[in-house]
Image (cartoon, rainbow, N blue to C red):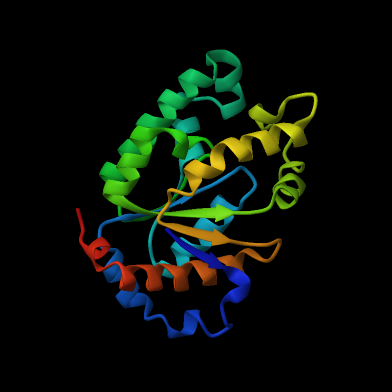
Amino acid sequence: MTIVETLDLPDSSESRVDRDELRATIGERAVVLVGMMGSGKSSVGRRLATRLGLPFVDADTEIETAAGMTIPEIFAQRGESEFRNGERRVISRILTTRAPLVLATGGGAFMNAETRARIADLGISIWLKADPEVLMRRVRKNAKRPLLQTANPEETLRRMLTEREPVYALADLTLVSRDEPHDVVVTAAIAALDEYLRANPDRKQTP
Protein backbone atom coordinates (compact mmCIF):
# COMPACT_ATOMS: atom_id res chain seq x y z
CA MET A 1 0.00 0.00 0.00
CA THR A 2 1.25 3.48 -0.89
CA ILE A 3 0.21 6.39 1.36
CA VAL A 4 0.25 9.95 0.02
CA GLU A 5 -0.38 13.13 1.97
CA THR A 6 -1.72 15.83 -0.34
CA LEU A 7 0.04 18.47 1.72
CA ASP A 8 3.39 16.77 1.06
CA LEU A 9 3.16 17.11 -2.70
CA PRO A 10 4.79 20.14 -4.34
CA ASP A 11 2.60 22.32 -6.54
CA SER A 12 4.48 21.12 -9.60
CA SER A 13 3.93 17.40 -8.91
CA GLU A 14 1.20 16.93 -11.53
CA SER A 15 3.05 18.99 -14.12
CA ARG A 16 5.79 16.35 -14.16
CA VAL A 17 3.27 13.64 -15.13
CA ASP A 18 2.80 12.79 -18.80
CA ARG A 19 -0.93 12.15 -18.67
CA ASP A 20 -1.02 10.43 -22.06
CA GLU A 21 1.64 8.03 -20.82
CA LEU A 22 -0.21 7.57 -17.53
CA ARG A 23 -3.45 6.85 -19.37
CA ALA A 24 -1.64 4.27 -21.51
CA THR A 25 -0.11 2.69 -18.42
CA ILE A 26 -3.52 2.34 -16.77
CA GLY A 27 -4.54 0.42 -19.87
CA GLU A 28 -7.91 -1.30 -19.70
CA ARG A 29 -8.15 -1.15 -15.92
CA ALA A 30 -10.53 0.86 -13.78
CA VAL A 31 -9.37 3.47 -11.29
CA VAL A 32 -11.61 2.75 -8.31
CA LEU A 33 -12.19 5.22 -5.49
CA VAL A 34 -13.12 3.75 -2.11
CA GLY A 35 -13.71 5.25 1.32
CA MET A 36 -16.30 6.59 3.71
CA MET A 37 -19.36 8.62 2.83
CA GLY A 38 -18.34 12.25 2.61
CA SER A 39 -14.76 11.52 1.52
CA GLY A 40 -15.38 13.11 -1.88
CA LYS A 41 -15.30 10.02 -4.09
CA SER A 42 -17.89 11.28 -6.59
CA SER A 43 -16.61 14.86 -6.81
CA VAL A 44 -12.97 13.80 -7.00
CA GLY A 45 -13.83 10.96 -9.36
CA ARG A 46 -15.53 13.20 -11.91
CA ARG A 47 -12.57 15.58 -11.98
CA LEU A 48 -10.03 12.77 -12.10
CA ALA A 49 -11.85 11.12 -15.01
CA THR A 50 -11.87 14.41 -16.94
CA ARG A 51 -8.14 14.91 -16.47
CA LEU A 52 -7.35 11.33 -17.45
CA GLY A 53 -9.71 11.36 -20.42
CA LEU A 54 -11.74 8.46 -19.03
CA PRO A 55 -15.49 7.94 -18.46
CA PHE A 56 -16.76 8.42 -14.92
CA VAL A 57 -19.31 6.15 -13.25
CA ASP A 58 -20.86 6.51 -9.81
CA ALA A 59 -21.78 3.06 -8.51
CA ASP A 60 -24.61 4.39 -6.32
CA THR A 61 -26.25 6.05 -9.32
CA GLU A 62 -25.97 2.81 -11.29
CA ILE A 63 -27.53 0.87 -8.41
CA GLU A 64 -30.46 3.29 -8.26
CA THR A 65 -30.97 3.00 -12.01
CA ALA A 66 -30.88 -0.81 -11.90
CA ALA A 67 -33.33 -0.96 -8.96
CA GLY A 68 -35.62 1.81 -10.18
CA MET A 69 -35.56 3.44 -6.74
CA THR A 70 -33.29 5.57 -4.59
CA ILE A 71 -30.81 4.07 -2.16
CA PRO A 72 -32.85 5.21 0.89
CA GLU A 73 -35.88 3.50 -0.68
CA ILE A 74 -33.90 0.30 -1.26
CA PHE A 75 -32.80 0.28 2.38
CA ALA A 76 -36.33 0.98 3.59
CA GLN A 77 -38.14 -1.50 1.35
CA ARG A 78 -35.61 -4.30 0.82
CA GLY A 79 -33.07 -3.91 3.64
CA GLU A 80 -29.31 -3.47 3.71
CA SER A 81 -28.56 -7.09 2.84
CA GLU A 82 -30.46 -6.86 -0.46
CA PHE A 83 -28.80 -3.52 -1.19
CA ARG A 84 -25.33 -5.04 -0.65
CA ASN A 85 -26.11 -7.94 -2.97
CA GLY A 86 -27.21 -5.54 -5.68
CA GLU A 87 -24.18 -3.34 -5.08
CA ARG A 88 -21.83 -6.30 -5.51
CA ARG A 89 -23.49 -7.35 -8.77
CA VAL A 90 -23.55 -3.85 -10.23
CA ILE A 91 -19.89 -3.13 -9.44
CA SER A 92 -18.82 -6.48 -10.91
CA ARG A 93 -20.74 -5.72 -14.10
CA ILE A 94 -19.25 -2.24 -14.39
CA LEU A 95 -15.70 -3.50 -13.92
CA THR A 96 -16.19 -6.35 -16.37
CA THR A 97 -17.96 -4.50 -19.18
CA ARG A 98 -17.11 -0.80 -18.96
CA ALA A 99 -13.45 -0.43 -18.01
CA PRO A 100 -11.30 1.58 -18.51
CA LEU A 101 -13.04 4.19 -16.39
CA VAL A 102 -12.96 5.98 -13.06
CA LEU A 103 -15.43 4.38 -10.65
CA ALA A 104 -16.66 5.89 -7.39
CA THR A 105 -18.01 3.25 -5.00
CA GLY A 106 -20.30 3.51 -2.01
CA GLY A 107 -18.83 3.56 1.47
CA GLY A 108 -19.58 -0.09 2.21
CA ALA A 109 -18.72 -1.60 -1.17
CA PHE A 110 -15.05 -2.32 -0.46
CA MET A 111 -16.03 -4.25 2.67
CA ASN A 112 -17.24 -7.12 0.47
CA ALA A 113 -14.42 -9.62 -0.15
CA GLU A 114 -15.71 -10.57 -3.61
CA THR A 115 -15.87 -6.92 -4.66
CA ARG A 116 -12.33 -6.31 -3.35
CA ALA A 117 -11.08 -9.27 -5.37
CA ARG A 118 -12.76 -8.01 -8.56
CA ILE A 119 -11.27 -4.56 -8.04
CA ALA A 120 -7.82 -6.08 -7.47
CA ASP A 121 -8.14 -8.11 -10.69
CA LEU A 122 -9.53 -5.36 -12.90
CA GLY A 123 -8.55 -2.07 -11.30
CA ILE A 124 -6.33 0.12 -9.20
CA SER A 125 -7.92 1.13 -5.90
CA ILE A 126 -7.50 4.49 -4.16
CA TRP A 127 -8.73 5.05 -0.62
CA LEU A 128 -9.72 8.67 -0.05
CA LYS A 129 -8.99 8.99 3.65
CA ALA A 130 -10.36 11.91 5.65
CA ASP A 131 -10.62 12.71 9.35
CA PRO A 132 -13.96 12.05 11.09
CA GLU A 133 -14.53 15.77 11.64
CA VAL A 134 -14.18 16.48 7.92
CA LEU A 135 -16.49 13.60 7.03
CA MET A 136 -19.13 14.69 9.53
CA ARG A 137 -19.15 18.27 8.25
CA ARG A 138 -19.81 17.00 4.76
CA VAL A 139 -22.42 14.34 5.51
CA ARG A 140 -24.47 16.74 7.64
CA LYS A 141 -25.42 18.40 4.34
CA ASN A 142 -27.24 15.23 3.27
CA ALA A 143 -29.98 14.10 5.62
CA LYS A 144 -30.78 11.02 3.49
CA ARG A 145 -27.83 8.81 4.46
CA PRO A 146 -29.57 5.56 5.50
CA LEU A 147 -26.82 4.35 7.81
CA LEU A 148 -26.76 7.65 9.72
CA GLN A 149 -30.44 7.65 10.63
CA THR A 150 -29.58 7.01 14.28
CA ALA A 151 -29.90 8.87 17.58
CA ASN A 152 -26.23 9.86 17.40
CA PRO A 153 -25.02 10.10 13.77
CA GLU A 154 -21.52 11.26 14.73
CA GLU A 155 -20.98 8.30 17.04
CA THR A 156 -22.31 5.99 14.33
CA LEU A 157 -19.93 7.44 11.75
CA ARG A 158 -16.94 7.07 14.07
CA ARG A 159 -17.87 3.45 14.81
CA MET A 160 -18.21 2.69 11.10
CA LEU A 161 -14.87 4.34 10.42
CA THR A 162 -13.18 2.22 13.09
CA GLU A 163 -14.64 -0.95 11.58
CA ARG A 164 -13.89 -0.07 7.98
CA GLU A 165 -10.47 1.58 8.07
CA PRO A 166 -8.48 -1.70 8.30
CA VAL A 167 -10.25 -2.89 5.15
CA TYR A 168 -9.92 0.41 3.29
CA ALA A 169 -6.20 0.19 4.09
CA LEU A 170 -6.00 -2.81 1.72
CA ALA A 171 -6.41 -0.42 -1.24
CA ASP A 172 -3.44 -0.01 -3.58
CA LEU A 173 -3.15 3.70 -2.75
CA THR A 174 -4.19 5.71 0.28
CA LEU A 175 -4.66 9.40 -0.42
CA VAL A 176 -4.83 11.39 2.81
CA SER A 177 -6.70 14.62 2.17
CA ARG A 178 -7.69 17.48 4.37
CA ASP A 179 -10.64 19.85 4.05
CA GLU A 180 -9.31 21.34 0.84
CA PRO A 181 -10.54 21.88 -2.74
CA HIS A 182 -11.23 18.68 -4.65
CA ASP A 183 -8.92 19.83 -7.45
CA VAL A 184 -6.03 19.63 -4.98
CA VAL A 185 -6.94 16.02 -4.23
CA VAL A 186 -7.21 15.24 -7.95
CA THR A 187 -3.77 16.68 -8.60
CA ALA A 188 -2.39 14.50 -5.80
CA ALA A 189 -4.22 11.44 -7.16
CA ILE A 190 -2.68 11.86 -10.61
CA ALA A 191 0.82 12.25 -9.19
CA ALA A 192 0.29 9.30 -6.83
CA LEU A 193 -1.05 7.05 -9.59
CA ASP A 194 1.94 7.84 -11.78
CA GLU A 195 4.40 7.17 -8.97
CA TYR A 196 2.62 3.97 -7.93
CA LEU A 197 2.58 2.48 -11.43
CA ARG A 198 6.23 3.35 -11.98
CA ALA A 199 7.11 1.60 -8.71
CA ASN A 200 4.87 -1.39 -9.46
CA PRO A 201 5.44 -2.24 -13.13
CA ASP A 202 3.50 -5.50 -12.80
CA ARG A 203 0.34 -3.42 -12.33
CA LYS A 204 0.88 -1.95 -15.80
CA GLN A 205 -0.35 -5.14 -17.39
CA THR A 206 -3.94 -5.17 -18.54
CA PRO A 207 -6.06 -8.18 -17.51
Query: In the image, residue 127 lies at what x, y percent?
Result: 50, 53
Q: Is residue 86 left or right of residue 161?
A: left
x then y, percent, for residue 19: 38, 76
Which image quadrant is residue 156 in? top right
Which of the image's four quarters has the N terminus? bottom left
In which quadrant of the rendered view does residue 144 lie?
Answer: top right
Question: Does 143 sit above or below residue 102?
Answer: above
- Residue 148, picture quadrant: top right
| Residue found 50% across the figure and 81% down from its top | 13
Give above or below for 104 relative to 183.
above
User: Relative to 75, is 170 on the left or the right?
Assistant: left
Name, please, the residue furthest toward the right.
Answer: 151
Q: Residue at x 38, y 72 (%)?
A: 194
Residue farthest toward the top in the current orientation of the protein: 77
In x, y percent, where is residue 143?
74, 34
- Tell me which residue sits at (67%, 66%) in the image: 181
Which residue is painted at 55% across and 51% down in the image?
A: 41
How many discs mark residues in the rendered view?
0
Compared across the picture, whether 108 is left or right of 118 comes to: right
Residue 84 at x, y percent in the picture: 46, 26
- Taking depth in this image into account, of 177 and 74 the one nearest to the observer is 177
